[in-house]
Amino acid sequence: MTPAQTRTALRAAILGGTYLPGERLVEAQLTAHFQTSRSAVRAALRDLAGEGLVVAEPHRGAHVRKVSLAEAIEITEVRMVLEGLVASRAAATVDDAGAAELAEVGGLMRAAVEAGEFRRYSDLNQRLHALIRRIAGHRTADDLIGRLHGQLVRHQFMLSLLPGRPAVSLAQHEHVITAILARDPAAAEAAMRAHIASVIDALHTLDGTP
Amino acid sequence: MTPAQTRTALRAAILGGTYLPGERLVEAQLTAHFQTSRSAVRAALRDLAGEGLVVAEPHRGAHVRKVSLAEAIEITEVRMVLEGLVASRAAATVDDAGAAELAEVGGLMRAAVEAGEFRRYSDLNQRLHALIRRIAGHRTADDLIGRLHGQLVRHQFMLSLLPGRPAVSLAQHEHVITAILARDPAAAEAAMRAHIASVIDALHTLDGTP
DNA sequence: GGGCGGCGGATTGTCAACAATCCTGTCGAC
DNA sequence: GTCGACAGGATTGTTGACAATCCGCCGCCC
């Protein structure tokens, strides 16, 4: 297994929950688990530390980063402005094919909510955000959003369990889609920010001081 | 020299212009230059690749990342929304001591422009942005801004040479300061975004298609 | 009984030699 | 003269052994 594959596999393992936040990542264990070399493991750990998925302290080893609620809120705030930027750019550059796909995803989301298929709605949610990022073609923002998203997998999971979220977020998503279809960058950014702001509000309610 | 020191030194060398964009970074050379071990150099290169300062291709070595104008614009767009977020948070959380320091820096900037001390103005510019980030206390945004800033040192340098910039940016900076002192987050964000948007405009004028 | 010092295992950090890969320049064939 | 194969050197990637560090545990002293 090459170092790049090791990094990918380790990242997938962390994101997939094989290694839980706070869990120690011992080089020897990982070497055995992934059937690779220790140097590859060390390189992978170093890379993932740069991505914020792992924290490594000298002579004390690495462990899966534990993101506090306050950090999760910070990260989501940053995601809010980044996705706002991306939505704005998408509205400015969307072509007819992209517009058609946006409309399609919007319809599917509404259908999923009305049918009560929350899991499907969650998948469509990811597809929508990915589609908007693809339309925007903003590599720099895209990379950062992906990186931040990875740091949040744990909290993302908690959020999706909050009851009633799909209903409120559907309307917000439709606002975003409408604004992009209208080629209105300012409205698209505002709608996307409002959407993610409501996620931040939901995060605050998980706090001791809502 | 420890690996952490090596990383710091290599980063400083790249940011300081010792190694120019596109220049190859040969492990053996760096090892000799920094009087350290090859493993430390390799670790440093890997870290800086994660920061976006270096690009490393397997079996083909590492070189200083060359940021195209289009990428510089993307990066600055992201910086615009991030600094906007930070300015907003600063306006929401600034205390009296921070307000006093903001006012002081604002006064110094005006004085520097009126005296034609552009180098001093540039230093104060950095100090102002750093101060705002300190007041906001937003670690996530702060780290990303720092990282993006590093990728732009070359272009930043070009921009500072554009004639007439200090005069126009002074007014924008004062708007930002005024909004933060007024504890008006929305106004602070808008002012900061307007400021950096004008930098983006300046970047566009460097393009073949202004 | 509590705190201090040090021992031992586990783990990470370092190093040097070796292997694999890539690039360059040269030679030969057509 | 140009194209392709091929060797040589330079450079990166990998490995295994060794050194340094940290942590928990035990015994000792007060």
Image (tube, coloured by chain):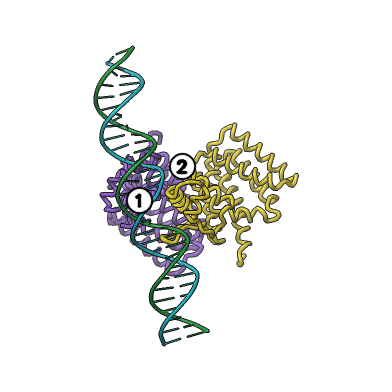
Chain colours: A yellow, B purple, C green, D cyan
Camera sees residue B166: no
Residue B134 in the figure: left or right of residue A149: left
Q: Residue at x 40, y 59 (%)?
A: B130
Q: Locate residue B158, reporting x and y percent.
A: 32, 44
Q: Work out whether B107 lies above or below B81.
A: below
Of residues B121 and A51, the one drawn nearer to the viewer in this rendering:
A51
Tell me which chain the residue with mark 2 is part of.
A
Q: Residues within 10 Å of mark 1 (few under 14, many from 20)?
A: few
What's under tag 1, amino acid-wise? Ser
Q: Locate residue A201, reporting x and y percent.
A: 61, 58
Tell me which chain the residue with mark 1 is part of.
B
Q: Locate residue A173, reporting x and y percent.
A: 64, 46
Q: Which labelled disc corresponds to residue B39? A: 1
Q: Work out whether A141 lies above or below A76.
A: above
What's under tag 2, amino acid-wise? Thr
Of residues B126 and B104, the one drawn nearer to the viewer in this rendering:
B126
Distance of label 2 from label 1 (alpha carbons): 18 Å
Q: Element type at marker 1?
A: helix
Residue B56 in the figure: left or right of residue A66: left
Q: Residue at x 29, y 53 (%)?
A: B36
Residue on which the image places disc 2: A2
